[in-house]
Amino acid sequence: KEHIKEIEQFVSTSKDEIETFRIKYLGKKGLLNDFFGAFKNVPNHQKKEFGQVVNQLKAAAANKVTVLKQALENTTDTKGQYGDLTRPGEPIEIGARHPISIVKNKIIDIFSRIGFNVSEGPEIEDDWHNFTALNLPEYHPARDMQDTFFVQTDPDILLRTHTSSVQVRYMESNKPPIRTISPGRVYRNEAISARSHCFFHQVEGLYVDKDVSFADLKQTLQYFTSEMFGKSKIRLRPSYFPFTEPSAEVDVYWGLETETDYRMTKGTGWLEIMGCGMVDPNVLQNCDIDPEVYSGFAFGMGIDRIALLLHQISDIRLLSENDIRFLDQFKGAL
Ligand code: PHE
């Protein structure tokens, strides 16, 4: 058995080593001849098995010598043991960035130009950071707005439903002025279809300082959308989030009359791209920031939806299936 192993594992590109190997096993005084010589002393009932094993060894050793010699010839007859160094190399496939990363990096880039840093937090969260600190006390009906995955049976540990949880963590450990965006994966217990998935990606933003106003929020959004989508109209519709007051939904005009970016599918009208609002004083208080002194705005958007829009992808599931034919199409996109 140990010989079989040795034969299998033997590799060499040196002529001498191969020859030594050949002599050790297959030479006139080699191991195999010894085994064949010993055959007559093997008890009758073991002869059959012994013979099979020895023949197997012989075949394996002979085969190894042939294969290695062949390999040696293929390389050494041209330019020595490394082969022909003048031959052109095998082309190496380059990868492509994932569309989620492309869009995420673009968003980070746009906000970093106006002083926002990037913060990250855990995907497995506790109730405090995902809900309670964000002004959603237990039994608050708005908790049903986001169907939550709980980790096992512990109602305190869950998969975060938004990256607002990161903003709570950031406020707990940093004092104003705060300008941060939090990209990351989030989870919601939703049926999977072409339009929605049980996990997706968000970028949420937070700005807290003295005298931050709704006008600052609107200007920031206007700046962001025109950098992201080309010169574009936005509109704010009143909405409700427990952690912001007032709250709004942001629509961008994906339409015909605007001077649109070439990537836009024209003629689809107003499209909702994010939620936003002025940070609720209760949230600031929960993070030990004095709402009498400071105010802030927050916003949150889904990266996947924006990636679908910009790249005209028809099914959100493509973003997580990792089909190489799909991913290949983003080669060269940055
Ligand atoms: N957290 C909200 C969501 O997941 C988005 C949001 C963020 C809305 C900040 C307002 C302010 O849908």
Image (tube, rainbow, N blue to C red):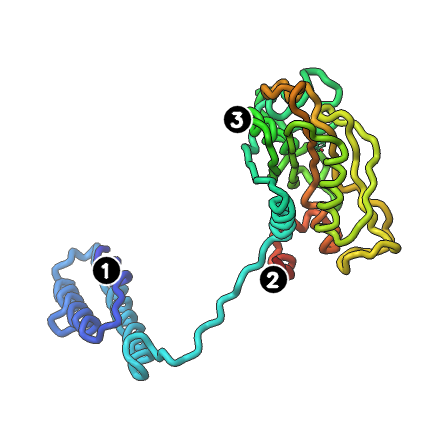
Q: Does label 1 point to a residue whose CB lies under 8 Å from ligand 1?
A: no
- Which secondary structure lies at badge 2? loop
Q: Residue 331 carries which label?
A: 2
Ligand 1: give its quadrant.
Answer: top right
CA gap, disc 2 and disc 3: 39 Å
Please rate how many residues cluster around mark 2, counting C-alpha atoms within 10 Å: few if below 14, some from 14 to 19, many from 20: few
Of the numbered discs 1 and 2, the one sitting upstream in the chain is 1
Q: Quadrant of the N terminus?
A: bottom left
Dot 2 amino acid type:
Lys
Residue labelled with disc 1: 6
Residue extending farthest bottom: 78
Q: For the residues labelled 1 and 3, say whether their Cβ atoms are less than 8 Å apart.
A: no
Residue labelled with disc 3: 173
Vertical side of 31 occupied by 177: above or below: above
User: From this viewpoint, is residue 201 visible?
Assistant: yes
Residue at the spot 69% in from the left edge and 50% down from the top edge? 307
Among the 4 quarters of the image, the one containing residue 64: bottom left
- Which secondary structure lies at badge 1? helix
Q: Quadrant of the C terminus?
A: bottom right
